[in-house]
Amino acid sequence: STPVTPTAVCQELLDLLKNFKSHMAAIAEGHGLTTMQLHALHAIADGHATMGKVAHTMHCDASNVTGIVDRLTALGFVTRQEDPRDRRVKSLQLTPHGTAILQEVVEELPVRLGCSRLSQQELTSLHSSILKLIAD
């Protein structure tokens, strides 16, 4: 058989990314969310808990995040509070409901993406390969 080339692997990674985005959109929709709202929940859960940090993490303008966070607040997934040191800064936190939704998504993703079908050896190999690719 012909050897696998870096170009072929890059194309496969692009295909995987397209697959991932499609599954994330379906998961978000299944929970009554948009993909951007789901990304915002992840960013807030990861400790990027100000509007500016969420915008930076999501690679979008802070004005876009305001609408996303307004909706997540209305849905009861996020709380927003003024920073006592600087009232211009809004601190964001997941509510227990927001945390529960995110946990459901985290549990759903490996099944949807097919990671749960991989053997322990395949998971270990993929894990180390991914770490190598994302290392700075």
Image (tube, rainbow, N blue to C red):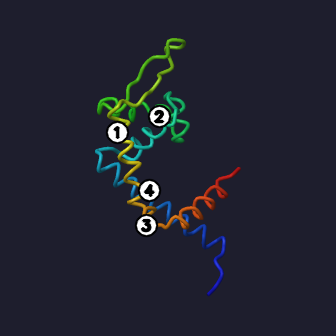
128 and 46: which is toward the camera = 128
**Amino acid type of disc 2?**
Ile
The reply, left or right, for residue 18 in relation to residue 131 is left
Viewer-side label of 3, 4:
3
CA gap between label 3 and label 1 equals 25 Å
Please state the horizontal and vertical placement of residue 55, each as a whole percent of the image.
Answer: 51, 35
The residue depicted at 52 percent of the width and 64 percent of the height is: 120
Give the residue pinned by disc 3.
117
Three-letter amino acid code at the position of disc 3 = Arg
Residue under label 1, please give it: 100
How far apart in space, not on screen, are marks 4 and 2 (Cα)?
19 Å
**Tag 3's secondary structure?**
helix
Counting residues from the start of the chain, the first of labels 3 and 1 encountered is 1
Residue that label 2 marks: 44
Element class at badge 1: helix
Contact, mark 3 vs mark 1 (Cβ under 8 Å): no
Q: State yes or no: discs 2 and 1 in contact (Cβ < 8 Å).
A: no
* Occupied quadrant, residue 78: top left
Judge whether 60 appears above or below 16 on screen. above
Q: Earlier in the sequence, mark 3 or mark 4?
A: 4
Relative horizontal placement of residue 56, taking residue 4 as reference (left or right): left
- The amino acid beneath tag 4 is Lys
Mark 1 is on which residue type?
Answer: Ala
Note whether 24 is above or below 80 in the view shown: below
Secondary element at tag 2: helix
- Decide: is 50 above or below 56: above
Q: Residue at x 53, y 14 (%)?
A: 86
Label whose residue precedes the other's in the sequence (4 or 2) = 4
For the point 44% across and 34% down, which residue is it?
A: 65
Residue 77 pos. (x, y %): 34, 33
- Please name the residue that numbered disc 4 is placed on: 21
Would you call the spot at circle 2 few (<14 residues within 10 Å), some (14-19), or many (20 or more)? many
